[in-house]
Image (tube, grey):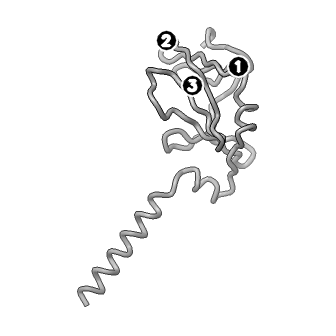
Amino acid sequence: MKTSIKMLALTGIMMLTLVACKTVGETLVENGATPFTKSETIAYISGKTQVWSKGGAFHATDGSLDTLWSGTREVGTWSVTDEGALCWHIASWGDGACDSYYHDGGGVTTVYKGTAKPAQALHDGNILDSL
């Protein structure tokens, strides 16, 4: 009897672990969202300034990147993975700074570091000097 209870508890823990491992993106897709393709992400972000809470980033059509965060400007490059994720390449930011975009009920949702939220405002051209 004790062995059966232990096996049942272990099975429950394993199932909870599997559910916890589901990514935010997988959950969005299960709820009807569709991920951007590589070409959709490029068309969505290229030549635009993405506005953030403390600044923004201008994604030039040539792949260069100009950022402003809390009054500090930095430059780098941007790229899009085959899966459609937008990645920023700035030495001081380290690796792994990527956003994934999803078509979600007529809007756009972004996932960054495991958190989903409505996509940041985009403006044509480089408006960093006005932020």
Residue 58 occupies which quadrant of the picture? top right
- Relative to 15, residue 23 above or below: above
| Amino acid type of the residue tagged 2 in the rendering | Gly
Label 2 or label 1, whichever comes before in sequence order: 1
Residue 71 bears which disc, if any? 2
Crowding at dot 3, Cα within 10 Å, few <14 / some 14-19 / many 20+, comes out as some
Label 3 or label 2, whichever comes before in sequence order: 3
Q: Quadrant of the N terminus?
A: bottom left
Distance from label 3 to label 2 (Cα)?
A: 12 Å
Label 1 or label 3, whichever comes before in sequence order: 3
- Relative to 39, residue 71 above or below: above
* Count of numbered marks: 3
| Amino acid type of the residue tagged 1 in the rendering | Asp
| Amino acid type of the residue tagged 3 in the rendering | Trp
Q: Residue at 57% of width from left, 42% of height from top? A: 111
**Tag 1 residue:** 62
